[in-house]
Image (cartoon, helix red, strand yellow):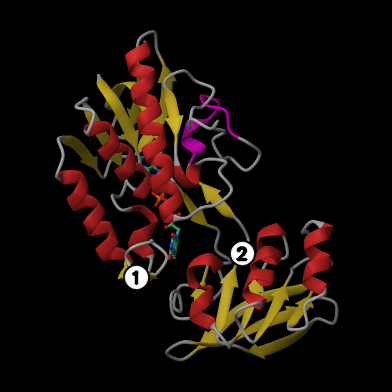
Amino acid sequence: PYDVLVVGGGPASASAAIYAARKGIRTGIVAERFGGQVNDTAGIENFISVKRTEGPKFAANLEEHVKDYDIDVMNLQRATGLERKQDFVEIELENGASLKGKSVVLSTGARWRKIGVPGEDEFRNKGVAYCPHCDGPLFEGKDVSVIGGGNSGVEAAIDLAGIVNHVTVLEFSSELKADSVLQERLHSLPNVTVLTNAKTTEITGEDNVNGLTYIDRETETEQHIELEGVFVQIGLLPNTDWLGDSVERNKFGEIVVDRHGATNVPGVFAAGDCTDDPNKQIIISMGSGANTALNAFDYLIRN
Ligand code: FAD
């Protein structure tokens, strides 16, 4: 078996694998698609010490750094199950094979839930955005909307209101779902409009986003707003369904970890966007990947 078997190939996984390999222990990475979410990212401006880079370049750098070490990279392999055996943890793969690890780091990441309307894919990174921490500053002084009135949507709107000219929040149901303290904060801001009963039907544009069409479900009329950015905030889905009940997950499906990145299963650790860590960013996933690898090493020398 591997000493540390990392499941996933994003920033958290790369960091966990490099930290493990630097201990001189047998390390493997099994990934469905090496690079993870950064493959789909345009500009990255908040990876501290690198002023600006592009997602695909960042992903290539991750891979190059991993290849600098004695790490077995098994790319294009999907994990479908986990089982704790007597002396090791078994990871089953879609192709029918299985891999063994004395310890395992789960870092299968997450994906943004899409609204699935025309224009969403076409204008991705051309006005359609999902991460306010990442892309908010690109819309300085512009008019934007936030789709989704839950906690993440309302937090995003409050955050964006400090940067952009105006924010329109569109909520499908008849009221916002966010905590009341967030709603109060939102309503206190002068440059935010809240639309409830608003069903977004299309994101419009030519080269870039120029507006959004929605149906006012109360009056059943179609409305159009002119704006330059649309932040979709209807949920971040962790890639953890494949774990079933083998590892404890919270109601959002996120893997529950402690300060050491340990899960409820001995020898199984988790890092990055697939965990219940509230903040999902590259630099944070890398920190947690490093943290879990060091704690997995500690687990190995004690067991
Ligand atoms: P991920 O990057 O999601 O990687 C998960 C990995 O696991 C992938 O390799 C995937 O193929 C693999 N995997 C999934 N399921 C399985 C399975 N069953 N078996 C095997 N492998 C599996 N963050 C920033 O800090 N700055 C930014 O500017 C920024 N911009 C972003 C823009 C966009 C459009 C998006 C989508 C995200 C952005 N983020 C940004 C967030 C950042 O990309 C994530 O926080 C970060 O990639 C999380 O890393 P991770 O390793 O935890 O997971």
Disc 1 C-beta below 8 A from ligand 1: no
Disc 2 C-beta below 8 A from ligand 1: no
The quadrant of the rendering that contains the C terminus is: top left
Residue 260 seen from this side: yes
Count of numbered circles in the view: 2
- Looking at the picture, tell me which residue is in the foreground, 195 or 292: 292
The prevailing secondary structure element of the residues shown in magenta is loop
Asked whether residue 179 is drawn in magenta, I would say no
Residue at the image position 39 percent from the left and 57 percent from the top:
37
- Contact (CB < 8 A) between labels 1 and 2? no
Q: Give the image location of residue 148, x and y in percent.
A: 68, 66
Q: Give the image location of residue 72, x and y in percent.
A: 18, 35
The quadrant of the rendering that contains the N terminus is: top left
- Depth check, mark 1 against mark 2: the one in front is 1
Horizontal arrangement in the rendering, residue 142 relative to residue 174 (left or right): left
Location of residue 90 (image quadrant): top left
Helix, strand or loop for disc 2: loop
Q: Give the image location of residue 187, x and y in percent.
A: 82, 73
Residue 180, labelled with which disc? none
Helix, strand or loop for disc 1: loop
Mark 2 lies on residue: 233
Horizontal arrangement in the rendering, residue 82 relative to residue 264 (left or right): left
Query: Label 1 to label 2, Cα distance in Å?
Result: 26 Å
Relative vertical location of residue 180 with respect to residue 156 in this rendering, above or below: above
